[in-house]
Image (tube, rainbow, N blue to C red):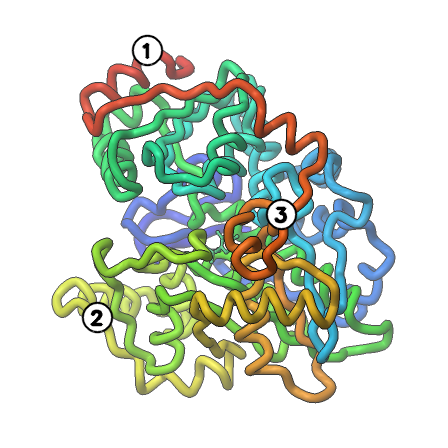
Amino acid sequence: MQYISTRGGGEPLSFGEVLLEGLARDGGLAVPAQMPRVDGETLDRWRALTYPQLATEVLALFATDIPRDDLARMTAAAYASFPAEVVPLRPIGDGLTLVGLSEGPTLAFKDMAMQFLGQVLEYALERNGSVLNVLGATSGDTGSAAEHALRGKERIAVFMLSPQGRMSAFQRAQMFSLDDANIHNIAIDGVFDDCQNLVKQLAGDIEFKRAQNLGAVNSINLARITAQVVYYFWAWLRATDAGGPAEVSFTVPSGNFGNILSGLYAKLMGLPIRRLVLATNENNVLDEFFRTGVYRPRSAAETLATSSPSMDISKASNLERFIFELFGRDAQLVVQAWNELDEQGFFDASADQPRFADEFGLVSGTSTHADRIDTIRSVHASAGEIIDPHTADGVKVAREHVEPGVPMLVLETAKPQKFAETIREALGVELEYSDELRAMLDAPQHVTEMADDAQALRAFIEAAALKG
Ligand SMILES: *Cc1c(COP(=O)(O)O)cnc(C)c1O
């Protein structure tokens, strides 16, 4: 399988090459040259597989340059610390079922992809004898998932910037309690956008980037997208009976359009998915797009701080991969749309809007703080389950799209323990923490405080980066 750019430039690359290169050289995103296809017979054969075995089968379709035995070893290692099922399904009534994606070390769905990415990155670096210094900015979930996946890796170091004093106590503890020598937590005196600007400044300096072997593991990372495709297959196999095909729908609490894009890939590969329901919070730039066909990214100042903070986005980096499919994989049209966006601040695909649902199954909805609180309460009352605020956004929007006879699978993107304040507001209860989580919350913290100063950050990285 070769990978091409959504903007048509550059030579096709292998999976391994994309893994280490990140962005396509023309500024576009890497996509499979053709989408792999899976038929009904294969699906039935996959029913007997464990999660790591299924992951090996699905990932082998994308990572054709990695021998299958190596893939099998990596998927086994990636999900070894998860419960036996890895992704459990729990019905909550009214035709809704939760798909448990948050059983990993940081209690959010980003572990699903990041744990595999840690394995495959180390493998690729070993194969070509290089090292990688990951530079990233986080407001919470991404940073902790990356650090827990990459800790202790010999050829990888992590430099993770976070806004000082702006993460929850739980999120801080998840990152700062790590004392691995290859993990560097840097608390910047600023907000998340300041952190992101520092990353852009340093990663945009091509010479510095090359000299320091800098890379990223953000949500446009192709290996993350492909690892997420696996659980759509898994959930479909658990929710349907042999002999199918029976359609199911998924609802996905969304921010950067990474998670739901993986669902779209599963559908384009032939998995019988009826609807992919995109749920946003008050930062509903994507709901607006899917309802109207007009995509108008917002400024940082227009981005609200909500009680489902991991969905607080102003633009959705992965949307370009959908636009590429929408425009029949015509890179010229993608470039045109993005030029239009640069010139006038929006692009207008309203003529194609009916195709979003008809061809791709994509529909959407918005959930607010009040909806979140109501939904946490109602699911607790009817099913005895405590769901996190992001999953609550999903359940709220899912209820608006349930169809008779079609199972509605809602992706559980985090555990409630990560967001205890909102649970307290909704239910008036204090959540129990396991002994392990208690120990993490009480552990000594390791973090370097730094001014919002690119020069200071450069010096820090030069001194601590792994040398290739
Ligand atoms: C990252 C995240 C999301 C959003 O996922 P995208 O892939 O960015 O759309 C939703 N919920 C939680 C808990 C997250 O951490």
- Kindly report which numbered mark, 2 or 3, lies closer to the viewer in this rendering: 3
The residue at 49%/43% (across/down) is 141
Alpha carbon of mark 2 to alpha carbon of mark 3: how far?
44 Å
Q: Are the residues tagged 3 and 1 within 8 Å (C-beta)?
A: no
Residue that numbered label 1 is attached to: 463
Residue that numbered label 2 is attached to: 346
Q: Position of residue 218 (x, y in %)?
A: 42, 43
Relative to the observer, which residue lies in front, 17 or 109?
109
The residue at 30%/25% (across/down) is 210
Q: Dot 2: what SS? A: loop
Q: Earlier in the sequence, mark 3 or mark 1?
A: 3
The residue at 36%/45% (across/down) is 23
Horizontal side, residue 196 vs residue 240: left or right: left
Relative to the observer, which residue lies in front, 257 or 417?
417
Q: Are the residues tagged 2 and 1 within 8 Å (C-beta)?
A: no
Q: Are the residues tagged 2 and 3 within 8 Å (C-beta)?
A: no
Q: Position of residue 254 (x, y in %)?
A: 47, 62
Relative to the observer, which residue lies in front, 342 or 198?
198
